[in-house]
């Protein structure tokens, strides 16, 4: 094999993990071939055309300011300005007919929240301080058991912590581990600026598409609609891939940036053993309902509504600084119960509950709507999940893993995916594995 070809790295999967790995390798001057089966880059964080809406993020995404690897990726792609962050954490929570704010102040930190979060009594707010010593020693238990052991009042769980954990971890406190819950509390509630939310200003796949010139400048190539059918092994080493079209592409190393249940199909049966624990990682669904109203209906750019089918509603139009007909994205996390319902029923129930915090939706004309289901939206960070997350270095020489499910310390997020891509690229470049 010619030297140029031997140094080539193949990245399978053009989600955020694969895009990050490709960008990082290209920056280091390595020729990369990035292979994505879909028409666009982005995987679970893709945008696409919805008739009536134009190009939209199919599953609405939010980025926290504290996500350093994802922000590094945006910088690498020259797209830092494409996400607009709040100056500080400000989250409206609609409950029992009123909005109260979870907010932080750069100097006073969460003190305004303690005075102003009226969904809880002063006693209940004070009881939340028990989280502070609790964070020092987090048991290997569910978040619900941990919060109960700290005697956090049930109303504080229902109006504040359940919606926070559900949106950040895509699971109920009964399902997710205390360790991940503690991480979310630290990063969102206890980090003065880090918890601030960022909103994408342009469709996400366009951002990830900026990796193309970066890769090409380093002598590589990005190929969409290129489904990999097999990873070729020779003498226990990854030496290339075979596409569905039959084309074989040689490479010195392969970064597999796709979920374990998909990767396993690309490997010969006898070589799948190292994924046996990863395949047991449970996954959790999200349902995203897109509404297009003929006029503005939300009084705030976004809100969380614990206890309502709606859960959370984002005015994509306002968050992107536009006016006119309002695109509202309703995000239903941990949406197992919604997967089997007919789309019409999902739409009606969600629309009905949207009318509570957004009464203007009653008089508005619905121009268009879509119910999109993501059965494998994120892995569920259940107790014990860390023992199942596979490292990016595999027993097969020249084969590296990337993906939000690898052990990044983060839950299933853009940040986890970006971290895994950086880490896989770094391991692949390291002379240790040559
Ligand atoms: C609806 C929804 C909302 C979300 N909201 C948020 C949020 O607000 N904030 C946040 O941080 N995270 C959010 N997430 C999670 C986030 O999107 C994921 O953690 C992240 O995108 C995972 O990236 P990845 O690259 O690890 O995996 P993936 O995106 O799954 O990438 C894998 C890629 O591999 C490709 N592929 C698979 N098989 C093959 C093959 N044989 N050949 C070629 N290509 C192949 C797939 O098409 C895909 O593009 C959300 C996810 C969903 C679904």
Image: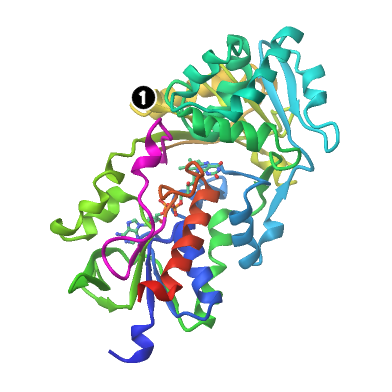
Residue placed most toward the observer, 419 or 360: 419
In magenta segment, residue 298: no
Q: Which secondary structure, mark 1?
A: loop
Instruction: Establish whether ligand 1 lies closer than 8 Å to the Cβ of label 1.
Output: no
Residue placed most toward the observer, 87 or 405: 405
Q: Residue drawn at (41%, 35%), measured in percent from left and top?
A: 380
Task: State the colouring used for the structure image.
Answer: rainbow
Total tally of numbered discs in the picture? 1
Res 376 seen here: no
How far across and how far down the image is residue 84, in percent? 72, 49
Q: Quadrant of the N terminus?
A: bottom left
How far across and how far down the image is residue 421, in percent? 48, 60
Q: Is residue 338 left or right of residue 152?
A: left
Residue placed most toward the observer, 389 or 298: 389
How far across and how far down the image is residue 259, in percent? 35, 50
| The furthest residue to the left | 270
Q: Quadrant of the C terminus?
A: bottom left
Crowding near the residue tagged with mark 1, few <14, some 14–19, many ≥20 C-alpha atoms within 10 Å: few
Q: Residue drawn at (53%, 13%), measured in percent from left and top?
A: 148
408 in relation to 171, above or below: below
How far across and how far down the image is residue 137, in percent? 55, 28
Q: Is residue 140 left or right of residue 162?
A: left
Q: Is residue 273 left or right of residue 64?
A: left
* Residues in magenta, as a range: 376-402
Res 73 seen here: yes
| The furthest residue to the right | 107
66 in relation to 349, above or below: below
Residue placed most toward the observer, 44 or 73: 73
- The residue that label 1 is drawn on is 341
Snapshot quadrant of residue 132: top right
Q: Is residue 71 left or right of residue 178?
A: right
């Amino acid at each position: 094999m010619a030297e140029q070809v031997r140094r080539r790295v193949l990245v399978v999967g053009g989600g955020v993990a694969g895009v990050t790995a490709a960008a990082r390798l290209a920056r280091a001057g390595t020729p990369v071939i990035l292979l994505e089966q879909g028409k666009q880059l982005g995987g679970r964080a893709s945008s696409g055309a919805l008739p009536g809406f134009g190009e939209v993020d199919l599953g609405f995404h939010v980025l926290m300011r504290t996500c350093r690897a994802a922000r590094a990726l945006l910088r690498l792609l020259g797209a830092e300005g494409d996400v607009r962050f709040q100056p500080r954490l400000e989250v409206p929570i609609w409950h029992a007919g009123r909005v109260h704010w979870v907010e932080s102040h750069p100097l006073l930190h969460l003190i305004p929240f303690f005075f102003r979060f009226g969904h809880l009594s002063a006693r209940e707010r004070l009881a939340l301080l028990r989280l502070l010593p609790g964070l020092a020693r987090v048991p290997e238990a569910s978040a619900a058991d941990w919060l109960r052991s700290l005697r956090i009042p049930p109303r504080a769980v229902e109006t504040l912590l359940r919606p926070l954990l559900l949106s950040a971890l895509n699971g109920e406190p009964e399902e997710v581990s205390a360790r991940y819950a503690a991480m979310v509390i630290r990063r969102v509630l206890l980090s003065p600026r880090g918890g601030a939310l960022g909103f994408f200003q342009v469709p996400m796949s366009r951002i990830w598409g900026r990796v193309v010139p970066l890769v090409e400048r380093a002598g590589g190539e990005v190929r969409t609609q290129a489904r990999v059918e097999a990873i070729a092994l020779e003498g226990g080493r990854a030496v290339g891939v075979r596409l569905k079209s039959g084309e074989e592409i040689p490479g010195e190393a392969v970064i597999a940036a796709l979920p374990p249940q998909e990767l396993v199909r690309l490997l010969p049966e006898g070589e799948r053993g190292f994924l046996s624990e990863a395949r047991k990682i449970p996954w959790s669904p999200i349902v995203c309902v897109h509404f297009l109203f003929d006029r503005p209906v939300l009084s705030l750019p976004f809100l969380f509504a614990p206890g309502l089918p709606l859960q959370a509603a984002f005015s994509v139009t306002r968050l992107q600084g536009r006016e006119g007909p309002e695109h509202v994205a309703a995000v239903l996390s941990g949406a197992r119960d919604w997967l089997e319902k007919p789309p019409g029923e999902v739409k009606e129930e969600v629309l009905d509950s949207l009318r509570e915090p957004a009464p203007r939706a009653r008089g508005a004309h619905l121009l268009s709507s879509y119910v999109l289901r993501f059965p494998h939206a994120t892995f569920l960070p259940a107790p014990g999940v860390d023992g199942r997350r596979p490292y990016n270095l595999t027993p097969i020489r020249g084969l590296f893993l990337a993906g939000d499910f690898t052990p990044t310390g983060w839950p299933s997020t853009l940040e986890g995916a970006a971290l895994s891509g950086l880490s896989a690229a770094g391991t692949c470049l390291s002379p240790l594995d040559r």
